[in-house]
Every structure is written in C-alpha cells, then in structure tokens.
Image: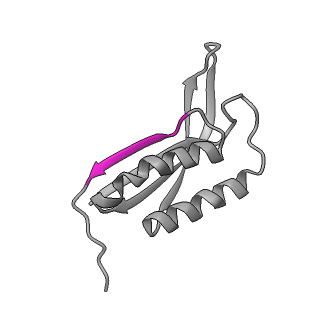
Amino acid sequence: MYALQFIAGIGEDKNGQPLHDLERKLETIREELATTFGGYTEQAASGGWINGQGRLVKEPSVVWTTVTNHAKRERGLNTARFIAAQLNQESVLFNSFAIDSEFIGA
C-alpha cells in the first residue's frame, strides 16, 4: 500500500494573482481524488517559498492524502498535474510513501 500526498498553495497562482473561484476549484480536485483513489483526507496548512524576484511568498496551502495500491501510484503523477492546472500553480508537491496500513472495521 502507498500513501500519496499532494501539497498545493492556494494563496495565489503562479503569476502572483489571487485564485478566483477557489472553492469551485477545490471541489473539482476533491471529486477527482475521490473518483481516482476512492477517497482522500484534506488538511489546511501554510508554507512559504522564494519567488523569481527573491521575495518570500507565504501562503495558505492544502494537503491531500490518499491511500492506494501500487497499481494506482503512477496515477498520482497525473493527479498532481491536474491539481497544478486547476490552481494555475507552477508545481504541486507529490509524495509517495510505502506504508503498512489497514482499514479496520467494527
């Protein structure tokens, strides 16, 4: 099993402009994650990076995590590209972790 993690800034786009229709874009991403991987966990975060002008950009971000089998791991790369396009971001951080995990029911 793998935990796939996607981290994207939601403060501004790659051109330094505010993101318009943010909630609609986030809902589209949520639907894609649920459809592709069967579900997701979403967490609010914040971070910073240095832009091309040497300016520290601090912005809110979102962390989405899914758990999947190895066969779907490669789809994570396409999903990261999808998220970057939806949010007009230069990049989205994609992490993949091998995990020993089980869903436990009552």
Residue drawn at x 43%, y 46% as measured from the top left: 77
Q: Is residue 96 magenta?
A: yes
The colouring scheme, among rainbow, by chain, secondary structure or one colour, is one colour
Height in image: 1 above or below 90? below
Q: Is residue 50 magenta?
A: no
- Residue 49 image position (x, y, % from top left): 55, 25
Residue drawn at x 44%, y 69% as measured from the top left: 38
Out of 77 and 26, give the one closest to the viewer: 77
Which corner quadrant of the image does residue 88 belong to? top right
**Main secondary structure found in the magenta portion:** strand
- The stretch in magenta equals 91-98
On screen, residue 23 versus residue 50, left or right, reads right
On screen, residue 93 versus residue 3, left or right, reads right
Spot the residue most to the left: 100
- How many numbered callouts? 0
- Residue 95 image position (x, y, % from top left): 38, 44
In the picture, the quarter occupied by the N terminus is bottom left
Spot the residue most to the top: 54
- Residue 70 image position (x, y, % from top left): 28, 58
Residue drawn at x 52%, y 54% as measured from the top left: 43
On screen, residue 40 versus residue 59, left or right, reads left
Out of 70 and 5, give the one closest to the viewer: 70
In the picture, the quarter occupied by the C terminus is bottom left
Height in image: 106 above or below 18? below
Out of 48 and 23, give the one closest to the viewer: 23
